[in-house]
Image (cartoon, grey):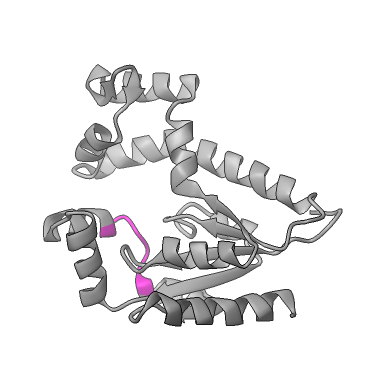
Amino acid sequence: MDEKHCPVIGIVGGIGAGKSAAAKAFAELGALVVDADEIAHVVLDWPDVKERIEKTFGAGVLKDGRVSRQALSKIVFADDALLRQLNAIVHPAVIGESRRIIDAAARDADCKAVILDAPLIFETGLQGLCDVIVFVDADENTRKRRLFEGRGWDEAELERRQKFQDSLIYKRQQADYTVDNNGSPEIAARQVASIWKRVLGG
């Protein structure tokens, strides 16, 4: 980031809080969004990553020659040790690719800001790439409703996923700004716009 400083804004929050919606609101203001989940999709197709996953978890995680995220999730979210093995394979690739995209954006004269939308920013050390952290807040009932209705999850699935993430209290404490996303998308978007102006000094 030596040619031009393009601020990197990391987005954190609980599962179902609306981090992707906040990232989209930033994108509409002109930010480049680096979506770690999308990068993970791409990384799973890298030959070396796919080979290691197949070797570790068996050919049953492949469907039509590609890694099945659904099959893989059923295995790793039921076993802490297996999840750690998967993370050891995937996370370095995702972090490396995120860093590459962010570094390229920093050299782009048209870059206004980069949004890092990653589920495990603190858990994987990605906060080191961020200049600012934004915590997207939503109460438990709101998050559950979104997950149960939107993704078809149940209490057991949510519990399996949440136990591998840092506490919301910790994430809130580490954040520079908070977006209250309990209300309408329009209300959240106005908060995003305010943060955008403060970060960019506009």
Identify the residue at the far right of this view.
3
**Quadrant of residue 65 within the rendered picture:** top left
Q: Quadrant of the N terminus?
A: bottom right
Q: Is 15 located above or below residue 63 in the figure?
A: below
Q: Which residue is more in the foreground, 172 or 192?
A: 192
Q: Is residue 83 left or right of residue 22?
A: left
Query: How many marks are shown on the rendered structure?
Result: 0
Q: Which residue is more in the foreground, 25 or 69?
A: 25
Q: Quadrant of the C terminus?
A: bottom right
Q: Is 188 located above or below residue 163 in the figure?
A: below
Residue at x-position 43% and y-position 55%: 120
**Quadrant of residue 152 within the rendered picture:** bottom left
Q: Is 36 in the magenta?
A: no
Q: Is 22 located above or below residue 199 in the figure?
A: above
Residue at x-position 68% and y-position 76%: 199
Residue 139 appears in the rendering = yes
Residue at x-position 36% and y-position 79%: 184
- Residue 85 location, x and y as percent? 35, 35
Residue at x-position 43% and y-position 65%: 21
Residue 163 appears in the rendering = no
Write the start and end of the magenta stretch as one range: 162-168
**Quadrant of residue 64 within the rendered picture:** top left
- Residue 96 location, x and y as percent? 60, 40
Q: Is 139 located above or below residue 41 in the figure?
A: below
Q: Is residue 192 left or right of residue 119?
A: right
Q: Main secondary structure of the magenta part?
A: loop
